[in-house]
Amino acid sequence: MFRRPLHERLRLFGLGLVTWPRNAHVDVAADHPEVIADIKQELEKYTWELSTKLASRSPLTLAAAKATINVGAEMDRDRGIEYALCEFLLLFASKDQKEGMKAFLEKRKPNFKGE
């Protein structure tokens, strides 16, 4: 069974919109500290942007996305889609969903509480 790389699975859930550091794939010898410092700086920037983005999301939505990414990826396509749909539908019973819709209609940032 083909399993998508993690960054592609995250992108499917709108979590991979931050640009991955361009040099993250480069093998660098230890005798090039300036290149290592650049990569470290880019990786720190990427990590900060991604963590800020994740912190703005509903905790329930993140938990559902994580479960779908981890559990659904181990299933065949049809069962994975069904699993993702069940996780998605369960979110509609939450207070966070109502807060998100209300915030959208009022054109403001939502205040998610994980309920």
Image (cartoon, rainbow, N blue to C red):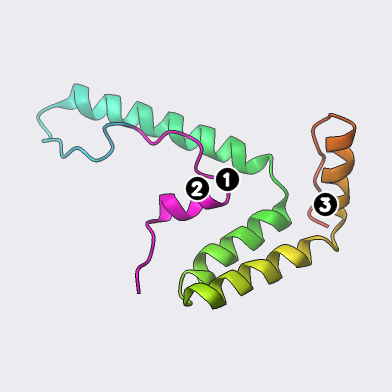
Magenta region includes residue 6: yes
Q: Residue at x 43, y 51 (%)?
A: 8
Question: In the rendered image, which quarter contains the N terminus?
Answer: bottom left
Residue kind at label 3, given as amino acid type? Asp
Q: Are marks 2 and 1 in contact (CB under 8 Å)?
A: yes
Question: Furthest residue to the top?
Answer: 34
Residue kind at label 1, given as amino acid type? Gly
Residue kind at label 2, given as amino acid type? Arg
Q: Are marks 1 and 3 in contact (CB under 8 Å)?
A: no
Question: Furthest residue to the front?
Answer: 78
Front position in the image: 97 or 82: 82
Examine the rendered structure and indicate whether residue 30 appears above or below residue 90. above
Q: Quadrant of the rendered structure where residue 86 is? A: bottom right
Q: Which residues are magenta?
A: 1-21
Q: Residue at x 58, y 65 (%)?
A: 68
Residue 16 image position (x, y, % from top left): 50, 43
Query: Residue 11, which numbered label?
Result: 2
Write down the residue under mark 1: 14
Q: Are marks 2 and 3 in contact (CB under 8 Å)?
A: no
Residue 29 image position (x, y, % from top left): 11, 35
Residue 20 image position (x, y, % from top left): 39, 36
Write down the residue under mark 3: 96
